[in-house]
Structures are given as C-alpha cells and as structure tokens.
Image (tube, rainbow, N blue to C red):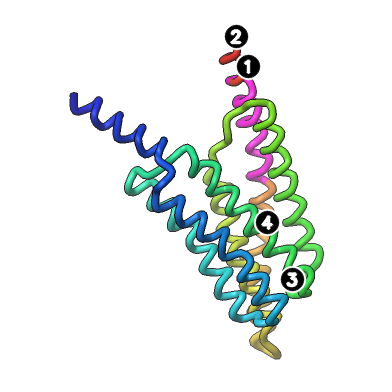
C-alpha cells in the first residue's frame, strides 16, 4: 500500500506542470530579452555578464531541486533543455554581434547547438520520446555557460585584467567545447534506441 502511494506521488509530479524547476526554466526564458537589451541596447557588458552567469547557475539549481525533491516532470524534461538551448543560442549570437567573443569559438558553439536542436526536432517529428540530457552534456554546457560571461568580462575591461579574463575564458571554454561535441556524438546511440523503442510500440 505504501509502495503504491509513493508510486502515485511520483506519477503526480511527472504529470504536474506547476513545479519549482519548471518555474525556474520559464523565468530563465523570460530573462533572455533583458540580457539582449543590456548587451546590445545599453552596451553594459559587465552587467550582462553577471546576468548570464546567474542564468547559467540556475540551470544547475533547477536540476538539483528536481532530483532532491522528486519534482522531475515530463514537461521539465522538455522545458529545461529548451530553455537552455534558447538562452544559449541567443546569448552567443548576441555576443557575436557585439564582438565580445572570438568568431570561431562562437560559430563552433552555434553549429553544435543547431545540429542538436534540429536532431531533437526530427526525433520529435518521428514520434520518438525526448532524450534525457546526459551527464557529459550537462557538464560541458555548464562550463560553456560560464565561459561566455568570462569572455564578456574580458571584453568589458582593459589592460591586464582583460588578458587575465581572456585566459580564464579559453582555459574553461576550450575543453568544454570539445566535451560539448563529444557529448553530442554520445546522443546518437540514444536517438537510435528511442526510435527503435517507438517503432516497437507501434507493432
């Protein structure tokens, strides 16, 4: 009886859209225009860097809350990576326009994110379930979400301070970007399995 109650509680969280992690993801999406306005409208790079860093930190926080308090939901599995990707793409694109990130670094990041986003749409169109974000994917994303604020700080300062922040940016960003591509390759077998699972469910 107790097991059934726990099972029903877990299912209620999965079906529930009103969870703290989901609210954090929605808030993250709603803050993206503010970042763009700060960077491109007001040219306040340091303030934009702080905001972007906070947004990156909330990505870890909502995942921790979902796991710690059993608030993982079906909507959250879609909303969290979607919010991450939108925030990421808009931030990188805005920084490329602003000139605060090296072109090659920004373009490589956008290419990887675009490929994964298109692949996710194709999977959804074929009826496969959404893939869970892997540990490698989360780790590389976390590194990049702090790399770009550091690039902003470097661009917003002068002299030695700028050089130090640039070194920090590359020190974290280069391995994170490599890991990001490696994580993307790791989704291929997961995608194949999801498609196979979907086909078997139709038989």
- In three-dimensional space, the C-alpha distance between marks 4 and 1, rounded to whole angstroms, equals 34 Å
Q: Which residue is mark 3?
A: 101
Q: Is residue 185 magenta?
A: yes
Q: Residue at x 66, y 80 (%)?
A: 45
- In three-dimensional space, the C-alpha distance between marks 1 and 2, rounded to whole angstroms, equals 7 Å
Query: Of the residues tagged 2 and 4, which is closer to the observer?
Result: 2
| Quarter that holds the N terminus | top left
Q: Quadrant of residue 48?
A: bottom right
Circles 1 and 2, Cβ within 8 Å, touching? The answer is yes
Disc on the earlier residue, 2 or 4: 4
- In three-dimensional space, the C-alpha distance between marks 2 and 4, rounded to whole angstroms, equals 40 Å
Q: Is residue 186 magenta?
A: yes
Q: Which residue is mark 4?
A: 177
Query: Of the residues tagged 4 and 1, which is closer to the observer?
Result: 1
Q: Nearer the viewer, residue 185 or 94?
A: 94
- In three-dimensional space, the C-alpha distance between marks 1 and 3, rounded to whole angstroms, equals 43 Å
Q: Nearer the viewer, residue 102 or 197?
A: 197
Do we see residue 171 in this rendering? no
Instruction: Judge left or right: residue 95 versus residue 68.
Output: right
| Quarter that holds the C terminus | top right
Q: Which residues are magenta?
A: 182-197
Disc on the earlier residue, 4 or 3: 3
Disc on the earlier residue, 1 or 3: 3
Q: Which residue is mark 1?
A: 199
Residue 115 image offset from top left, x and y in percent: 74, 44
Crowdedness near tag 1: few (<14), some (14–19) or many (≥20) residues, C-alpha within 10 Å:
few
């Amino acid at each position: 009886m107790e097991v059934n109650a726990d099972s029903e509680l877990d299912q209620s969280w999965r079906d529930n859209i009103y969870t703290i992690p989901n609210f954090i993801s929605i808030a993250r999406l709603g803050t993206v225009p503010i970042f763009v306005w700060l960077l491109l409208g007001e040219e306040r790079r340091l303030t934009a860097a702080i905001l972007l860093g906070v947004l990156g930190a909330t990505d870890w926080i909502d995942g921790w809350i979902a796991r710690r308090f059993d608030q993982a939901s079906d909507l959250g599995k879609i909303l969290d990576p979607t919010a991450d990707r939108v925030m990421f793409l808009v931030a990188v694109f805005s920084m490329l326009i602003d000139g605060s990130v090296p072109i090659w670094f920004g373009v490589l990041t956008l290419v990887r994110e675009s490929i994964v986003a298109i692949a996710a749409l194709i999977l959804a169109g074929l009826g496969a379930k959404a893939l869970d974000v892997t540990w490698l994917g989360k780790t590389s994303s976390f590194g990049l979400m702090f790399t770009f604020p550091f690039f902003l700080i470097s661009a917003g300062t002068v002299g030695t301070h700028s050089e130090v922040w640039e070194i920090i940016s590359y020190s974290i960003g280069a391995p994170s970007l490599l890991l990001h591509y490696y994580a993307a390759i790791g989704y291929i077998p997961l995608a194949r399995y999801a498609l196979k699972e979907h086909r078997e469910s139709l038989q």
